[in-house]
Image (tube, rainbow, N blue to C red):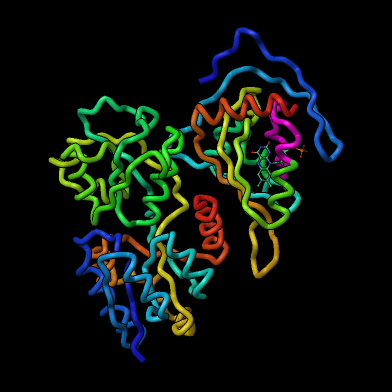
Amino acid sequence: MIYNLTVSPDFAPDHISGWYFFNTWLQRQLGERVHLELYDCFEKQREDIAADKIDLIYANPYDAAMLVREKGFRAVVRPQGKSDEAIIATLASSDVNAVEDLVPGITVATTDDPDVHTMGMIMLESADLNRSNISIEEVDSYVLVAKKLLQGKAQAGFFLKEGFEELSDLIRNQMKVLVCSQISVVHHTLLVGPRMAESIPQLTEALLSMGDDEKGRKVLESMDLTAWEIMEEEETEFMIDLIDTLID
Amino acid sequence: MLSQNSDGPRQVQIDYFDGSSRTVDVVDREVPYPDGKLIVSRTDPQGIITHANQAFVDMSGYTKEELIGENHYILRHPDMPAVAFAGLWETIMAGTKWHGYVKNLRKDGAFYWVKATVIPNVRNGKLVGYTSVRRKPSRSKIAESEALYATLK
Ligand SMILES: Cc1cc2nc3c(=O)[nH]c(=O)nc-3n(C[C@H](O)[C@H](O)[C@H](O)COP(=O)(O)O)c2cc1C
């Protein structure tokens, strides 16, 4: 049997090779064949999840909710010290200095990243802005969100905090942050599907001790992670409940 | 951060649904909602607080130790009409999500407005408690709610 591993399409492109190293490391640890399938958009990945093609996924918290509640997946670990936070930014030279300065009729640049978009929309609520009184322009990456702002085609942009920080200084310095979320309990997780459930104990043990040897540490580094931490079932349920309160 | 209001505190008695009551000091001073944060708490099925995040602790003015094990009505502001909470309990006990604007009372008598969402926590088909997540409300929604609640008192 070949298992299928995939990664939420919102990871930074610099770390693609890291996920291939991880896949190789994983096959050695489990003594099983694992195929890594990467997607460039959420929609195609969700189609394959719906068709039960995925066994192991490093998922965005928003998708984790669906995977656990509808697809019988179990979150086993989370990346240490990493949470998903969203930023709303505007052009540095703009008169807008707070979310409340944004007005109806503006264009907001966003990506298809569901949790960043949800958090961004929530942070606009304090300015009475919502789907009905702004235009939303969806682009493929945070670089393109920045581009929309720099070109004056959008007055606000939603970024994953990490994605914002990874922009070049040249681009970032032309923008200013209006608000940054500080939620801390919403983060990515590594989830295991029903077909692979038997491997959970072995997999968890291998992941938790991944940083103990040189090889594992190098792989973690290449994915820009420091270590994996155990994800208790109730912790996952709590995160899902919390996300549930953010979706209408 | 704390500035004393010129009017000084007024003492108000609050009667709770469970028949208990307490006298609180209320001051007419709003503490602004912290940008970017979510205020999170969880209760058992009876509304007793079982979890509060740091933003909850900071905004309420109580310590975590003071909050855990308390009834969630510890935050009830006298300007909030009882009917608003009756609606909350009716909604969540029916297993559905509740949204509303709430004026909360801090330990120091000041207040803060939130947009709250409360959902039932169901595990293996069984209700184990409720989670409330609050976010920053807009000034216009606060004004609307103030006007509405004044008529419901
Ligand atoms: C999860 C949860 C969170 C709640 N949060 C608040 C709150 O922040 N402020 C508040 O006044 N009541 C809150 N309530 C409602 C209280 O339980 C209570 O109904 C309310 O304070 C009014 O008190 P009374 O029902 O005794 O009149 C919450 C209830 C639940 C289940």
- Residue shown at 33%/65% (left/top)? A42
- Locate residue A177 relative to residue A56 in the image: left or right: left
- Residue shown at 27%/36% (left/top)? A155
Magenta residues (range): B69-85
Residue B70 visible in the snapshot: no
* In magenta stretch: residue B82: yes
Whether A59 is drawn above or below A176: the answer is below
> In what quadrant of the picture does the C terminus of chain B appear?
top right
> Ligand 1: which quarter?
top right
Q: Position of residue B147 (x, y in %)?
A: 63, 24
- Locate residue A5 relative to residue A231 in the image: left or right: left
User: Image quarter for residue B93?
Assistant: bottom right
- Residue shown at 26%/51% (left/top)? A163
User: Image quarter for residue A181?
Assistant: top left
* In magenta stretch: residue A162: no
Q: Nearer the viewer, residue B146 or A32?
A: B146
Q: Nearer the viewer, residue A159 or A75?
A: A159
Q: Residue furthest bottom?
A: A1
Q: Nearer the viewer, residue B108 or A129?
A: A129
Q: Position of residue B85 (x, y in %)?
A: 72, 40
Q: Position of residue A161 (x, y in %)?
A: 31, 47
Q: Position of residue A225 (x, y in %)?
A: 30, 61
Q: Residue furthest left?
A: A170
